[in-house]
Amino acid sequence: MLKSIQRVAFGLTAAVALVGGANAQQVDTVGAIKARGQLNCGVSTGVQTGMSTLDASGNWAGFEVDFCRGLAAAILGDADKVKYVPLDIKTAFTTLQSGGIDLLARTATETFLRDVEMNLAWAGAYLYDSQGFLARKSLGVESALELDGASICVSAGSNYEQNLSDYFRNNSLSFTPVAANSRDQNEKNLIEGRCDVYANVLSALAGARSKMPNPDEWVVLPEMISMEPIGPVVRQDDYRFQDVVSWVLNAQIAAEEYGVTSKNATEMRDTSPSPEVQRLLGKTGDFGAKLGLGNDWALNTIQAVGNYGEMFSRHLGEESPIKLERRLNALWKDGGLLYTPLIR
């Protein structure tokens, strides 16, 4: 009897192993990207200053865009081999779930239901943001606690709608939502007076303010009503691709910590005595192969778009019209939240 039970148990274990192995082989996003010769990357709708903008000549730019470019450089060795798929928040997750894109790089906050119910996975956070409010100075409001009865522009179907409801309920205030499907429509509604204030993450509000005809007439109120960890999103069953995306982000953060930039990356690979730098840039070890990539994967990313600090400064920080402070998006050693696991 015991032997029979052992044989059944062994058979079930083998069957599970075979099914698990088959499932693992079914999902090969990196292989599909290589075969296609192109990364399909979901981004914002092309009007979000600092994150994703599309000019009249069809050129994309922004923080989200550069993350896609860095990932393409790691996988394909060419940062230009990206198809950008502009998505609003209502269609972003379903497009990823259906396989219409490989990766969602547009601003999307990780939440419980998105993780557990929608079967999505965040490959780290590349921006720690907070939700706030943008108001015209002439409104005479200095605090969100003075917004009782206000009309508020907000993106339909976004996490920010729930944050608003929670904040106003907690503070015994009322408001009227004015929902729109895109950020440009929200900004237009605000400018044309269809709402009193605009609710979004601070990076989006700073970008919106920078585009106003008279930016000095607008103010971001001091309250931050939520923490919004934003990062690249993959399908939850796409474990190997999640590793690749996560380590591309980790490589950019590590590069900033080790002083590796887009301009000195090759020199650092050849001359740095640091074992961590040597492993990061592919001089030693075989870490790229473990991801299904070449060992120059991180070098290619950094040469294409720079380290994290370069990318932030260019699109959101001091080199950009937004002038967003690093704050939580600084390295851990500078008082921020950014760190990377060791490459070893």
Image (cartoon, helix red, strand yellow):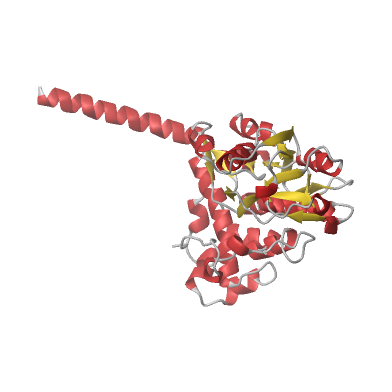
Splitting the image into 4 quarters, where does residue 253 fall? bottom right
Residue visible at 19% across and 26% down in the picture = 7
Splitting the image into 4 quarters, where does residue 108 fall? top right
Residue visible at 59% across and 71% down in the picture = 269
Q: In this view, does 258 lie above or below 193?
A: below
Q: Is residue 342 above or below residue 73?
A: below
Dividing the image into 4 quarters, which one contains the C terminus? bottom left
Q: Percent position (x, y) of residue 92?
A: 66, 35
Q: Percent position (x, y) of residue 153?
A: 74, 39
The answer to whether 178 appears left or right of 167 in the picture is right
Q: Percent position (x, y) of residue 120?
A: 53, 37
Q: In this view, does 45 lie above or below 277?
A: above
Q: Is residue 11 above or below residue 276?
A: above
Q: Is residue 78 visible?
A: no
Splitting the image into 4 quarters, where does residue 296 fall? bottom right
Q: Nearer the viewer, residue 197 or 323?
A: 197
The answer to whether 97 appears left or right of 209 in the picture is left
Q: Which of 107 and 191 is in front in this view?
A: 191
Q: Which of 333 and 241 is in front in this view?
A: 333
Residue visible at 69% across and 48% down in the picture = 146
Furthest toward the left, the residue is 1
Count of numbered labels shown in the rendering: 0
The answer to whether 165 appears left or right of 134 in the picture is left
Q: Can residue 52 be seen in this view?
A: yes
Residue visible at 68% across and 65% down in the picture = 310
